[in-house]
Amino acid sequence: MFRIVKKNILNETTDHITVEAPLIANKAKPGQFIILRTDEKSERIPLTIAGYDKEQGTISLIYQKIGHSTKALGALMEGDAILDLAGPLGKPTALDGYTKVAVVGGGLGCAIAYPQAKYLFDHGCDVTVFAGFRSREHIILEQEMKACCSHLHVLTDDGSNGNKGLVTDGLRGCIQQGETYELVIAIGPPMMMKFVSLLTKDFGIKTFVSMNPIMIDGTGMCGCCRVTVGGKIKFACVDGPDFDGHAVDFDELMRRNRMYLAQERGPGRDEHCNLLKQSVTITQD
Protein backbone atom coordinates (compact mmCIF):
# COMPACT_ATOMS: atom_id res chain seq x y z
CA MET A 1 0.00 0.00 0.00
CA PHE A 2 1.26 3.49 -0.89
CA ARG A 3 -0.14 6.34 1.20
CA ILE A 4 -1.09 9.70 -0.31
CA VAL A 5 0.56 12.29 1.92
CA LYS A 6 -0.49 15.40 -0.01
CA LYS A 7 -3.07 16.29 -2.60
CA ASN A 8 -3.49 19.51 -4.59
CA ILE A 9 -6.32 20.15 -7.03
CA LEU A 10 -4.68 22.08 -9.89
CA ASN A 11 -7.92 22.69 -11.80
CA GLU A 12 -11.30 21.05 -12.25
CA THR A 13 -9.85 18.06 -14.12
CA THR A 14 -6.27 17.81 -12.86
CA ASP A 15 -4.85 16.63 -9.53
CA HIS A 16 -1.33 16.61 -8.11
CA ILE A 17 -0.60 14.00 -5.44
CA THR A 18 2.47 13.15 -3.38
CA VAL A 19 2.78 9.47 -2.50
CA GLU A 20 4.99 7.58 -0.06
CA ALA A 21 7.15 5.28 -2.19
CA PRO A 22 10.72 5.34 -0.80
CA LEU A 23 12.17 2.58 -2.98
CA ILE A 24 10.86 4.21 -6.16
CA ALA A 25 11.89 7.70 -5.05
CA ASN A 26 15.42 6.50 -4.35
CA LYS A 27 15.89 5.31 -7.95
CA ALA A 28 13.64 7.62 -9.96
CA LYS A 29 15.08 9.89 -12.64
CA PRO A 30 13.44 12.40 -15.03
CA GLY A 31 11.53 10.75 -17.85
CA GLN A 32 10.63 7.56 -16.01
CA PHE A 33 7.13 6.41 -15.12
CA ILE A 34 5.20 4.12 -12.79
CA ILE A 35 2.21 1.83 -13.25
CA LEU A 36 -0.42 1.82 -10.53
CA ARG A 37 -3.65 0.14 -9.46
CA THR A 38 -5.93 1.99 -7.09
CA ASP A 39 -7.55 -1.24 -5.83
CA GLU A 40 -7.86 -4.95 -6.59
CA LYS A 41 -10.48 -4.41 -9.31
CA SER A 42 -8.71 -1.49 -10.96
CA GLU A 43 -6.94 -1.61 -14.30
CA ARG A 44 -3.22 -0.81 -14.41
CA ILE A 45 -2.45 2.71 -15.65
CA PRO A 46 0.92 4.32 -16.45
CA LEU A 47 1.75 7.79 -15.11
CA THR A 48 4.99 9.68 -15.57
CA ILE A 49 6.79 10.60 -12.36
CA ALA A 50 6.33 14.38 -12.04
CA GLY A 51 8.79 14.72 -9.17
CA TYR A 52 10.58 12.81 -6.45
CA ASP A 53 12.15 13.49 -3.06
CA LYS A 54 14.74 10.92 -2.05
CA GLU A 55 15.05 12.26 1.49
CA GLN A 56 11.31 12.23 2.14
CA GLY A 57 10.83 9.00 0.21
CA THR A 58 8.01 10.39 -1.92
CA ILE A 59 7.10 10.75 -5.57
CA SER A 60 4.68 13.17 -7.24
CA LEU A 61 2.05 12.26 -9.83
CA ILE A 62 -0.10 14.60 -11.91
CA TYR A 63 -3.11 13.23 -13.77
CA GLN A 64 -6.34 14.25 -15.45
CA LYS A 65 -9.60 12.71 -14.25
CA ILE A 66 -10.96 11.72 -17.64
CA GLY A 67 -11.47 7.95 -17.44
CA HIS A 68 -12.74 5.33 -14.99
CA SER A 69 -9.34 4.66 -13.43
CA THR A 70 -8.15 8.26 -13.13
CA LYS A 71 -11.51 9.24 -11.66
CA ALA A 72 -11.11 6.44 -9.09
CA LEU A 73 -7.64 7.75 -8.32
CA GLY A 74 -9.04 11.27 -8.03
CA ALA A 75 -11.55 10.06 -5.44
CA LEU A 76 -8.72 9.17 -3.05
CA MET A 77 -7.81 11.80 -0.48
CA GLU A 78 -4.81 12.54 1.75
CA GLY A 79 -4.29 9.59 4.07
CA ASP A 80 -5.82 7.10 1.61
CA ALA A 81 -3.62 4.50 -0.03
CA ILE A 82 -2.98 3.27 -3.56
CA LEU A 83 -2.86 -0.53 -3.74
CA ASP A 84 0.02 -1.05 -6.21
CA LEU A 85 2.87 1.09 -7.56
CA ALA A 86 5.44 -0.48 -9.87
CA GLY A 87 8.50 1.47 -10.94
CA PRO A 88 10.50 3.34 -11.84
CA LEU A 89 9.97 2.05 -15.38
CA GLY A 90 11.39 3.17 -18.71
CA LYS A 91 14.73 4.72 -19.52
CA PRO A 92 15.64 8.07 -17.92
CA THR A 93 15.99 11.00 -20.30
CA ALA A 94 19.63 11.54 -21.34
CA LEU A 95 20.02 15.08 -19.99
CA ASP A 96 23.66 15.34 -18.94
CA GLY A 97 26.21 17.38 -20.89
CA TYR A 98 23.91 20.06 -22.30
CA THR A 99 24.40 23.77 -21.64
CA LYS A 100 21.41 25.31 -23.43
CA VAL A 101 18.08 23.52 -23.89
CA ALA A 102 14.51 24.40 -24.79
CA VAL A 103 11.83 22.36 -23.01
CA VAL A 104 8.40 22.41 -24.67
CA GLY A 105 5.31 21.22 -22.81
CA GLY A 106 1.75 21.01 -24.02
CA GLY A 107 -1.13 20.80 -21.53
CA LEU A 108 -0.68 17.91 -19.14
CA GLY A 109 2.66 17.25 -20.85
CA CYS A 110 4.01 20.08 -18.70
CA ALA A 111 3.82 17.68 -15.76
CA ILE A 112 6.45 15.59 -17.55
CA ALA A 113 8.39 18.55 -18.94
CA TYR A 114 8.74 20.12 -15.49
CA PRO A 115 11.09 17.49 -13.95
CA GLN A 116 13.18 17.55 -17.15
CA ALA A 117 13.58 21.31 -16.94
CA LYS A 118 14.30 21.19 -13.20
CA TYR A 119 17.02 18.57 -13.58
CA LEU A 120 18.71 20.55 -16.35
CA PHE A 121 18.45 23.85 -14.46
CA ASP A 122 19.75 22.31 -11.22
CA HIS A 123 22.78 21.04 -13.15
CA GLY A 124 23.72 24.46 -14.52
CA CYS A 125 21.95 24.39 -17.87
CA ASP A 126 20.43 27.49 -19.48
CA VAL A 127 16.81 26.38 -19.83
CA THR A 128 13.99 28.02 -21.76
CA VAL A 129 10.51 26.60 -21.21
CA PHE A 130 7.61 26.95 -23.64
CA ALA A 131 4.32 25.85 -22.07
CA GLY A 132 1.07 25.72 -24.01
CA PHE A 133 -2.50 25.42 -22.70
CA ARG A 134 -6.03 25.79 -24.04
CA SER A 135 -6.84 28.71 -21.75
CA ARG A 136 -5.76 30.49 -18.59
CA GLU A 137 -7.96 28.16 -16.50
CA HIS A 138 -5.99 25.14 -17.71
CA ILE A 139 -2.52 26.47 -16.81
CA ILE A 140 -0.67 24.27 -14.32
CA LEU A 141 2.75 24.44 -12.63
CA GLU A 142 3.45 27.98 -13.84
CA GLN A 143 5.34 29.04 -10.70
CA GLU A 144 7.18 25.73 -10.48
CA MET A 145 8.35 26.02 -14.08
CA LYS A 146 9.31 29.66 -13.59
CA ALA A 147 11.59 28.64 -10.72
CA CYS A 148 13.54 26.12 -12.80
CA CYS A 149 14.31 27.96 -16.02
CA SER A 150 16.04 31.07 -17.32
CA HIS A 151 13.09 32.06 -19.54
CA LEU A 152 9.45 30.97 -19.38
CA HIS A 153 6.93 31.48 -22.19
CA VAL A 154 3.35 30.49 -21.34
CA LEU A 155 1.00 30.54 -24.32
CA THR A 156 -2.73 29.85 -24.58
CA ASP A 157 -4.86 28.93 -27.58
CA ASP A 158 -7.42 31.63 -26.78
CA GLY A 159 -5.02 34.28 -25.47
CA SER A 160 -6.84 34.48 -22.13
CA ASN A 161 -3.52 34.84 -20.28
CA GLY A 162 -2.48 37.72 -22.53
CA ASN A 163 -0.16 35.62 -24.69
CA LYS A 164 -2.04 33.94 -27.55
CA GLY A 165 -0.32 31.34 -29.67
CA LEU A 166 1.03 27.83 -29.98
CA VAL A 167 4.27 26.57 -28.47
CA THR A 168 5.65 26.25 -31.99
CA ASP A 169 5.04 29.98 -32.45
CA GLY A 170 7.03 30.77 -29.34
CA LEU A 171 9.86 28.39 -30.19
CA ARG A 172 10.10 29.58 -33.80
CA GLY A 173 10.12 33.21 -32.71
CA CYS A 174 13.04 32.71 -30.34
CA ILE A 175 15.04 30.77 -32.92
CA GLN A 176 14.42 33.41 -35.57
CA GLN A 177 15.57 36.07 -33.10
CA GLY A 178 18.92 34.30 -32.84
CA GLU A 179 18.50 31.91 -29.92
CA THR A 180 20.40 28.65 -30.35
CA TYR A 181 19.60 25.41 -28.57
CA GLU A 182 21.64 22.24 -28.38
CA LEU A 183 18.53 20.24 -27.65
CA VAL A 184 14.76 20.62 -27.70
CA ILE A 185 12.61 18.37 -25.50
CA ALA A 186 8.94 18.24 -26.55
CA ILE A 187 6.30 16.57 -24.39
CA GLY A 188 2.56 16.74 -24.93
CA PRO A 189 -0.11 15.70 -27.43
CA PRO A 190 1.31 13.78 -30.42
CA MET A 191 0.19 16.49 -32.84
CA MET A 192 2.11 19.09 -30.88
CA MET A 193 5.23 16.94 -30.71
CA LYS A 194 4.97 16.26 -34.44
CA PHE A 195 4.97 19.94 -35.38
CA VAL A 196 7.70 20.82 -32.88
CA SER A 197 9.82 18.07 -34.43
CA LEU A 198 9.12 19.30 -37.96
CA LEU A 199 10.16 22.79 -36.88
CA THR A 200 13.38 21.71 -35.18
CA LYS A 201 14.26 19.46 -38.11
CA ASP A 202 14.18 22.51 -40.39
CA PHE A 203 16.65 24.23 -38.05
CA GLY A 204 18.78 21.12 -37.48
CA ILE A 205 18.19 20.98 -33.71
CA LYS A 206 18.36 17.64 -31.91
CA THR A 207 14.95 16.78 -30.46
CA PHE A 208 13.63 14.32 -27.87
CA VAL A 209 9.93 13.49 -27.60
CA SER A 210 8.12 11.43 -24.97
CA MET A 211 5.78 8.75 -26.31
CA ASN A 212 2.36 8.06 -24.79
CA PRO A 213 0.88 5.08 -26.66
CA ILE A 214 -1.53 2.48 -25.26
CA MET A 215 0.29 0.53 -22.55
CA ILE A 216 -0.61 -2.45 -20.37
CA ASP A 217 2.23 -4.26 -18.63
CA GLY A 218 5.12 -1.78 -18.91
CA THR A 219 7.76 -4.49 -19.33
CA GLY A 220 7.83 -5.00 -23.09
CA MET A 221 5.80 -8.22 -23.02
CA CYS A 222 2.39 -7.16 -24.34
CA GLY A 223 3.57 -5.15 -27.35
CA CYS A 224 0.70 -2.65 -27.11
CA CYS A 225 3.01 0.36 -26.72
CA ARG A 226 4.91 -0.26 -29.94
CA VAL A 227 5.92 2.77 -31.96
CA THR A 228 7.80 3.08 -35.23
CA VAL A 229 11.05 4.99 -34.94
CA GLY A 230 13.37 5.26 -37.91
CA GLY A 231 11.40 2.54 -39.68
CA LYS A 232 11.90 0.07 -36.81
CA ILE A 233 9.48 -1.15 -34.16
CA LYS A 234 10.27 0.07 -30.64
CA PHE A 235 8.43 -0.36 -27.36
CA ALA A 236 7.83 2.85 -25.43
CA CYS A 237 7.90 1.12 -22.04
CA VAL A 238 11.40 -0.38 -22.31
CA ASP A 239 13.06 1.36 -25.29
CA GLY A 240 11.65 4.76 -24.29
CA PRO A 241 9.57 6.62 -23.48
CA ASP A 242 11.93 9.18 -25.07
CA PHE A 243 12.84 8.92 -28.75
CA ASP A 244 14.37 11.00 -31.55
CA GLY A 245 11.53 13.28 -32.59
CA HIS A 246 12.83 13.44 -36.15
CA ALA A 247 12.50 9.65 -36.54
CA VAL A 248 9.10 8.95 -34.95
CA ASP A 249 6.15 8.02 -37.16
CA PHE A 250 3.65 10.35 -35.48
CA ASP A 251 0.82 9.63 -37.93
CA GLU A 252 0.93 5.93 -37.06
CA LEU A 253 1.13 6.77 -33.35
CA MET A 254 -1.98 8.94 -33.55
CA ARG A 255 -3.91 6.27 -35.45
CA ARG A 256 -3.05 3.68 -32.80
CA ASN A 257 -3.99 6.05 -29.97
CA ARG A 258 -7.43 6.48 -31.53
CA MET A 259 -8.12 2.75 -31.97
CA TYR A 260 -10.25 2.41 -28.83
CA LEU A 261 -11.56 5.95 -28.61
CA ALA A 262 -15.22 4.91 -28.80
CA GLN A 263 -14.80 2.36 -26.01
CA GLU A 264 -12.91 4.83 -23.85
CA ARG A 265 -15.60 7.48 -24.19
CA GLY A 266 -18.63 5.21 -24.07
CA PRO A 267 -20.07 2.87 -21.47
CA GLY A 268 -18.39 -0.22 -22.95
CA ARG A 269 -15.30 -0.16 -20.76
CA ASP A 270 -15.40 -3.95 -20.24
CA GLU A 271 -15.44 -4.43 -24.00
CA HIS A 272 -12.47 -2.08 -24.28
CA CYS A 273 -10.53 -4.15 -21.75
CA ASN A 274 -11.41 -7.35 -23.62
CA LEU A 275 -10.14 -5.85 -26.88
CA LEU A 276 -6.88 -4.95 -25.19
CA LYS A 277 -6.54 -8.47 -23.81
CA GLN A 278 -7.11 -9.87 -27.30
CA SER A 279 -4.38 -7.60 -28.68
CA VAL A 280 -2.01 -8.88 -25.99
CA THR A 281 -2.78 -12.49 -26.89
CA ILE A 282 -2.23 -11.85 -30.56
CA THR A 283 1.08 -10.08 -29.93
CA GLN A 284 2.39 -12.82 -27.63
CA ASP A 285 1.48 -15.56 -30.10
Image: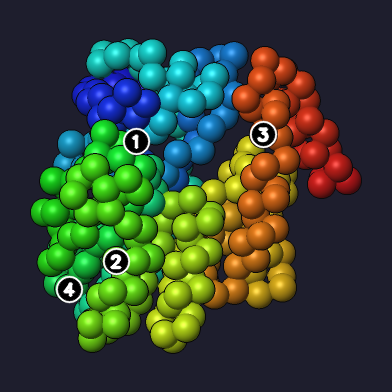
Mark 3 highlights which residue?
261
Answer few, some or many: residues within 10 Å of disc 3's Cα (few below 14, many 20 plus, some between 14 and 19): few
Disc with the residue nearer the chain's start (4 vs 2): 4
| Up-down relation of residue 129 to residue 37 (above or below) | below
Q: Which mark is residue 126?
A: 4
Indicate left or right for 136 with 227 as reference: left
Considering the numbered disc 3 on the image, is that residue within a helix, a strand or a loop?
helix
Quadrant of res 252: bottom right
Q: Nearer the viewer, residue 196 or 1?
A: 196
Amino acid type at image mark 4 = Asp
For residue 214, side relative to residue 132 (left or right): right
Name the residue carrying label 2. 170
Evaluate if marks 2 and 3 touch, with contact meaning CB atoms under 8 Å apart: no
Tag 2 secondary structure? helix
Q: CA distance from mark 1 to mark 3?
A: 22 Å
In terms of sequence position, does the residue under pointer 2 or pointer 3 come before the other? 2
Image: 5 above or below 239? above
Badge 4 or badge 1: first in the primary sequence: 1
* Residue depicted at 70% across the width and 48% down the height: 256
Looking at the rendered structure, the secondary structure element under dot 4 is strand
Residue at 65% from the left image edge and 55% from the top image edge: 253
23 or 267, nearer to the observer? 267
| Residue that appears at 54% across and 19% down | 68
Give how far across and how far down residue 92 sits, in percent: 41, 60
Q: Amino acid at mark 1?
A: Ile
